[in-house]
Image (cartoon, helix red, strand yellow):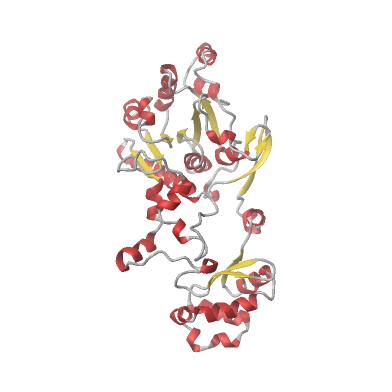
Amino acid sequence: MAPLDGIRVLELCHFLAGPYAGLVLADLGAEVLKVEDPSHPDDARSMGPYFQGEQSLYFLALNSGKRSIGVRLATPEGREVVEDLVRDTDVVIDNYRPGVLAKFGLDHDSLHAINPAVVTCSLTGFGETGPDAQRAGYDYTIQALAGVMSLAGDPDGPPTKAGISYVDHSGGISAALGVCAGLVERSRTGIGTHIDLSLFDVQISMLSYLASWQRNRGAGSVRTANSAHPSLVPAQNFATADGHLALFVGNDGMWLRLVDALGDESLREERFATRQGRLEHRDEVVDRIQGMLLTAPGREWEQRFGAVGVACGVVNDVAGALAEPQTAARGLVVQSEHPVYGRYEHLRGPLPTQGRLTVRPAPLLGEHSTEALESLGYPPERVAALRDAGIVC
């Protein structure tokens, strides 16, 4: 059994952060039913540039493991369907702007009145309180506002975003954590709670030691060449004969092992022996190592350094990362097959050793509407009437 087997989740989410939270919960065993309004389905369904048949690969990547029901939320009959689902649900997650679901009578207080044990989680850009509560929030803009862009890029270049949507992904993981905490709390009290999760909050919290340096010592944001660490040397990207190698020497013992692997006696000088000494002579240390690393391919250096416990890795592209033996060994890439759009590959959630052995393919819009309604005890004629009226699809 997976850890969340038996937990029922309604997901009213779109694009990335919310669906990723649902994906994590589904991978951990929860039964996730994605609720979409046919008038405004998840925009990820049409997200290009790549498609599997008529299905967006972007959508498939974020919604494997789930079922789907299409319900028109703006209609009284549609709201009644959702309310009936909530009566038999443990968790409801959404990533609408604050106040939107309240207009449909689907906010936490309304849902809690229907099912006092339900745990609700709202992922928003800036949370439900404060001057920015109604502000639109996307990964790009929150990377900027949370100070992250100021730290990335070359010293003389413009601020740079991270290569992945890590605000949304880390927000989704945080939401899944919040849901699990809410379920633990409910096991003690019998009462469901509401989780007000802000992507901005998550990113500010991840400034951690940088925030401590700034608040306590007034340290500013400093960008470094080659993604170098501000105080550890050598800890940066180096060019090799065929690409780049990320090298990270975290302590003085590792430095000695690196020197042994390089075989450069000049690096054994006492002035380089300590972390502070290497920082004071950063340019000399980096220049010397860089000259040596250019003489061989990255994988050769990776094997040589790895053999003596020095942290390093070639700088992969996405294809290279997916081809790493460790990726296969951990079962991170899986295949799913759908009767309509066929077979595709996608990634597991971040806890693969606790996840389901098999993963359901991402659903078509409304693919499981009839199944979900019949599980509520709706007779076939009522299901047919709802479909004929366009309330569900």
Residue drawn at (63%, 48%) of the image: 333
Q: How many labels sit on residues?
A: 0
**Quadrant of the drawing holding the C terminus:** top right
Work out whether residue 355 can be spotted: yes
Q: Position of residue 230 (x, y in %)?
A: 45, 70
Image quadrant of residue 205?
A: bottom left
Relative depth, front residue between 380 and 145? 145
Name the residue at 63% across, 54% down.
318
Q: Residue at x 54, y 23 (%)?
A: 369
x and y percent of residue 194 in the render?
Answer: 34, 38
Q: Is residue 187 visible?
A: no
Q: Position of residue 53 (x, y in %)?
A: 68, 33
Name which quarter of the figure residue 68 lies in. top right
To which quarter of the image does residue 97 belong? top left
Classify residue 107 as left or right of residue 393: left
Of 85 and 146, nearer the camera is: 146
Give how far across and how far down residue 375 sits, in percent: 50, 22
- Left or right of residue 329: residue 124: left
Q: Is residue 125 left or right of residue 329?
A: left
Closer to us: 155 or 342: 155
Q: Residue at x 59, y 29 (%)?
A: 364
Using the image, determine if residue 125 lies above or below residue 307.
above
